[in-house]
Amino acid sequence: MAVTHSCCGRFAARWTRSCHWGEAETAAAQKSAITNPLPAIARLIAARACGSAKNCARYFCRIDIFGQALDTSAPPTEQGRTVGVRSIALISLLLAAFTPTPPVFELRDVDLNGLDCATNLEGAAKTEDGKERNRQKNRAPIDLNGTKVVALDVPGFLARVAEYDRQIGKKRRRFLTPADKEQLATLESQVVSLTGWLVLAYHGVPETTNCKSRDFLDWHLELLAEPTDHAAQIGDPTPIICEITPRTEGALYRSGVRIQKLAAFIRLPDNSFVATGSKPHKIRATGYLLWDDDHNNDDRDVGSFIGWFSKDGYHHPWRSTAWEIHPAVKVEDLGE
């Protein structure tokens, strides 16, 4: 069996980072993989314990299995048996590592007992506008039976919120008058369903909404008017953002929603893109309308097309409007 040693080192480094190891543990794992690559394969299987098997497996790069003796000290007749047994065992382990829908980079049955601010809808915000925004983001799931839902496609959504932008006439909540805030509250009380194509999804970063927790993060779903066969690129149209919060994630998970089935690509914590193996699915996301004015800068946040990538790998602009569905309380799969 021939394994690219430098690749094993990169795999070990990425895997240990995904499991939140410290620098010392990461360096030790990387050195071990470079000097003795075979145990790194076993570590790949162990990575399932921290929930990152499929992504770690993708990072493992190129593994070429040849009909070579793994134990050259054994007699020729024994070498064949050794190769056969070890190859079968190795292939079995690798197949197990590549099982679909791993628990990391996928929805989960969230237990909010571990969230420090589970009962504090304002999260860790310090400013009044931040507290107002977080209260809206942290709204609880609702029963949609009997609820008036405004059904929109991507062009319809953009036309509707463009009118809202005109009515508000300001870029930030902190500039709103009491009368403006009443108008915004009415707009944000709407429950909206948006139909579009889910090409890319990813975990958000720690933010005040969830008390800056690294364990409780929002999921971002990027919905487009038309599907694409690639992750975000310069020149692509920007999406409408729909966000699943820790407060709505568990119910969606229990309803059978799986991001890696619906999205064609996942953005990883290092901002690289990885294919899920699925084609983009057309979905219908239903939830509260929200004006996320914290991401309302022209060119950097809001625009019609992706124009540039920052050094840290984020694409800009990354959204077509500051208006979004947040939180999403229902996600329906409408097929490929």
Image (cartoon, helix red, strand yellow):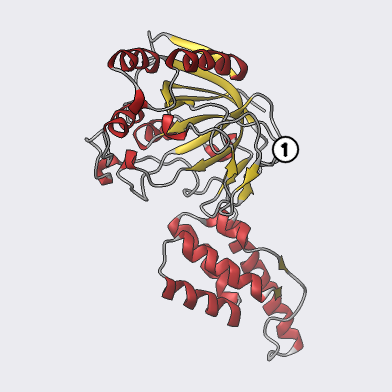
Q: Is residue 36 above or below residue 75?
A: above
**Residue ID at (56%, 72%):** 40
Judging depth in this view, the residue of 302 and 69 nearest the camera is 302
Residue 111 image-quadrant placement: top left
Q: On the rendered structure, is 301 left or right of 140?
A: right
Going 59% across and 82% down the picture, which residue do you hit?
35
**Residue located at (67% from left, 85% from top):** 71
Element on which disc 1 rests: loop
Instruction: Measuring from the top left, give residue 209's x and y in whole percent.
Output: 33, 38
Kind of residue at badge 1:
Asp
Q: Is 199 positioned to the left or the right of 286 in the image?
A: right
| Residue wearing tag 1 | 229
- Front residue of 282/46: it is 282
- Which residue lies at the image location 48% right of the left edge and 26% below the top edge? 324
Q: What is the count of numbered marks?
A: 1
Residue 134 in view (yes/no): yes
Q: Position of residue 278 (x, y in %)?
A: 65, 39
Quadrant that contains the C terminus: top right
Q: Position of residue 4 (x, y in %)?
A: 69, 73
Whether residue 152 is situated above or below residue 329 in the rendered picture = above
- Identify whether 144 is placed above or below 79: above
Q: Residues within 10 Å of mark 1 (few under 14, many from 20)?
A: few
Q: In the rendered image, which quarter contains the N terminus?
A: bottom right
Query: Based on the displayed image, in which of its 4 quarters is residue 270 positioned?
Result: bottom right
Farthest left residue in view: 119
The answer to whether any part of residue 46 appears in the image is no
x and y percent of residue 197 in the render? 63, 28
